Amino acid sequence: MPVNLSNGKPLAWDSAKLDADTKAMLDNLQPNILQAHVRENMSLLLVHFGDGADGRRFLRSLVPLMKSARKHLEEVREFNRSKKRGTPYVGVGISKLGYLKLGESTTKFTDNAFKSGMKRRKDTLSDPAVDAWEKHYQGEIHAIVLIGDATPEPVAATRTRVLALLPKTAKILGEETGEGLRDAQGRGIEHFGYVDGRSQPLFLADQVAAESGTNWNPFFPLSHVLAADPLAPHPSRHFGSYLVLRKLEQNVRAFREAEEALADALGFKGEDRPLAGAMLVGRFRNGTPLRLHGRPSAEGHPVQNDFSYRDDPGSRCPVSAHIRKANPRDSRDGGLERALGVMMARRGQTYGRRTDRPWDDASPATRPTGGVGLLFMAFNSSLQSQFEFTQQSWADEPGFPAEGTGHDPVIGQGRRDVKVRFPTEWDGKKLSAPRQQVPQTVTMKGGEYFFMPSLAYLKGL
């Protein structure tokens, strides 16, 4: 029988009762989709094929370097037991133009965003003109090869093997290098200095059990991340996922200046000054959610994620805060049903090296204005209903969830004509006078949409 993606229970991937079709799905699904792969070091190769037949042979030749989702999960379990390191991650995505170059029809793909390509969706996403993107994103990208591991050596070795397989008729349009960024306590952060990667949708039973709570349920059915691979031998048990890749450059100096200006405007002094940045992000730098605390929790406290906004009209966490705009949870902002239908499995990675300490309180003047940022990557069952909806209808919409909310202070794009208000104290009813929104400090430098096909499809090329 076909795999039931809408099952109301988390996937117990190692259960002895797992049916044959679900096993086949896991044996042919690429890793990093259902559970993040260790990828402190990453290489992203953007590939253009000059000859379709050579492209097919190249993609097929990568299969021996790849592993299945099941193999990845087994490696994770073994690492947790014995600390035995797993094998590098190799992932393959194909764009709509890539499929056409390979000689495939794309009529069976149902996602209109994928079938259009990101360049043709720039107005929907309020993106810069394509000629302002970095050069290697302006070309016709046919495929992406992702290589990742905990240390740089296996990534470099695997990259060498991949490039050795590249035919002469193909070329690498560009390459991105990702390196994990961590604070003094070893927590993963992004370049503005905030703990990143929380509130991920979870699909597997062991993950859900470890993070279950009373206010927020992290479980999401497989239908939110998997899509039948229409070109695979058996689409009812061979699945993939739509990948969005966007290079987002961060102007750290401008963002820190915006934090300082907001703190001054709201009259925050001393230990209360970090509250201004938390009002923009929704969490303090160490991950403490503003919904629960007006000051950062003590160092070493686990990053809390069991909360909702259902009884917070914005007096604690402003409705314009980044994590609230991007995930309204169970609240009047967008409703639990809509939030559950939109969330993506984010697998991004920071890029660019720093000589300063991103998490400290050094002067904004010491911070970079460019050259660092996020390689935003997320898996979707529908690019149009998940990623594009989040960007267009939430992040870029100043009227969401209510008139006068403003853009997402972190990822929102577009003219910031609407003025906004902030609470003048945590959990206080008094709001500031209307003030100009913080400037846009994240610039989209290029990207593309891909489908991560099943291993069964790649083997048959």
Image: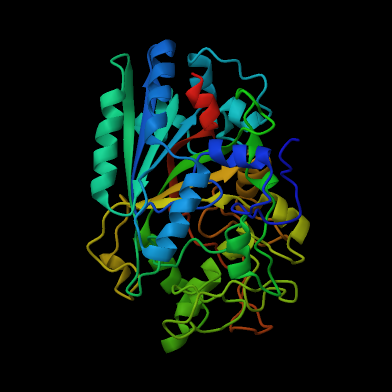
Vertical position of residue 237 compared to residue 230: above or below: below
Residue 257 in view? yes
The quadrant holding residue 112 is: top right
Q: Seen from this angle, which residue lies furthest front?
A: 16
Nearer the observer, 267 or 26: 26
Residue sitting at x 30%, y 52% = 352
User: Which color mode does the image show?
Assistant: rainbow
Q: Seen from this angle, which residue lies furthest bottom?
A: 270
On the image, the x and y values in percent for residue 347 come to: 48, 50
The quarter of the picture where the N terminus appears is top right
Is 408 left, or right, of 298 in this rendering?
right
Nearer the observer, 374 or 417: 374
On the image, the x and y values in percent for residue 197 come to: 49, 61
Vertical position of residue 101 compared to residue 391: above or below: above
Is 177 left, or right, of 235 in this rendering?
left
Residue sitting at x 50%, y 75% = 276
Vertical position of residue 331 compared to residue 26: above or below: below
Residue 188 in view? no
On the image, the x and y values in percent for residue 220 come to: 68, 55
Nearer the observer, 340 or 403: 340
Number of marks in picture: 0
On the image, the x and y values in percent for residue 183 come to: 34, 70
Is 29 left, or right, of 349 in this rendering?
right
Residue sitting at x 60%, y 47% = 391
Nearer the observer, 3 or 324: 3
The quadrant holding residue 38 is: bottom left
